[in-house]
Image: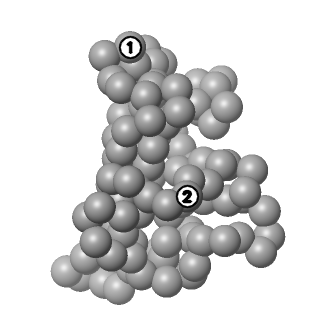
Amino acid sequence: MEATALVSPDRLWSAQEILVRPSPVPAAAGVYGWHFKQPPHPDLDAGRLLYVGIAPRYMANRTSTQNLRKRVRYHYRGNAAGSTLRLTLGCLLGLDLRRVGSGKRMTFGKVGEAKLSQ
């Protein structure tokens, strides 16, 4: 994929289009970009590439089971502990990040994660 395809794609997909089955996102390795019609923060420009991800990520100690479809869907339905995109957006929106359970995982709680998903 050329960098221009990430910055100026021919087509953008909505959450509704991505989350249907079958999904238009391939279950393959690759790079993806995230664009926003409405910026998540006033200091960011609308309609620009604001996030780039890769799937699967390189892991020295095990093989990742992630692919483009799984990663993109997780950004819509997952939580901040597993998505740098969700973590960043939640912080930009001023959501309250908190530790969940007895571990080190941080999320925005049920209410914050639901707001972020919207």
Q: Residue at x 42, y 81 (%)?
A: 29
Q: Is residue 100 left or right of residue 23?
A: left
Q: Residue at x 43, y 28 (%)?
A: 46
Residues at circles 2 and 1 in contact by the CB criterion of under 8 Å: no
Q: Residue at x 36, y 64 (%)?
A: 5
Q: Position of residue 76 (x, y in %)?
A: 60, 48
Mark 1 surroundings: few (<14), some (14-19) or many (≥20) residues within 10 A: few
Q: Position of residue 78 (x, y in %)?
A: 58, 49
In this figure, which residue is indicated by the disc labeled 2?
A: 11
Nearer the observer: mark 2 or 1; the answer is: 2
* Helix, strand or loop under label 2: loop
Q: Is residue 45 left or right of residue 18?
A: left
Nearer to us in this view, 6 or 60: 6
Q: Is residue 49 above or below residue 37?
A: below
**Residue 60 placement: quadrant:** bottom left
Residue farthest toward the left in the current orientation of the protein: 60
* Helix, strand or loop under label 1: loop
The three-letter amino acid code for the residue at tag 2 is Arg
Nearer to us in this view, 73 or 39: 39
Image quadrant where one finds the C terminus: top right
Q: Residue at x 33, y 24 (%)?
A: 44
Q: How many angstroms separate mark 2 from mark 1 (CA)?
A: 24 Å
Q: Is residue 5 left or right of residue 10?
A: left
**Residue 116 visible from this viewpoint:** yes
Image quadrant where one finds the N terminus: bottom left
In this figure, which residue is indicated by the disc labeled 1?
A: 42
Q: Is residue 50 above or below residue 67?
A: above
**Residue 98 visible from this viewpoint:** no
Q: Position of residue 32 (x, y in %)?
A: 41, 63
Mark 2 surroundings: few (<14), some (14-19) or many (≥20) residues within 10 A: few
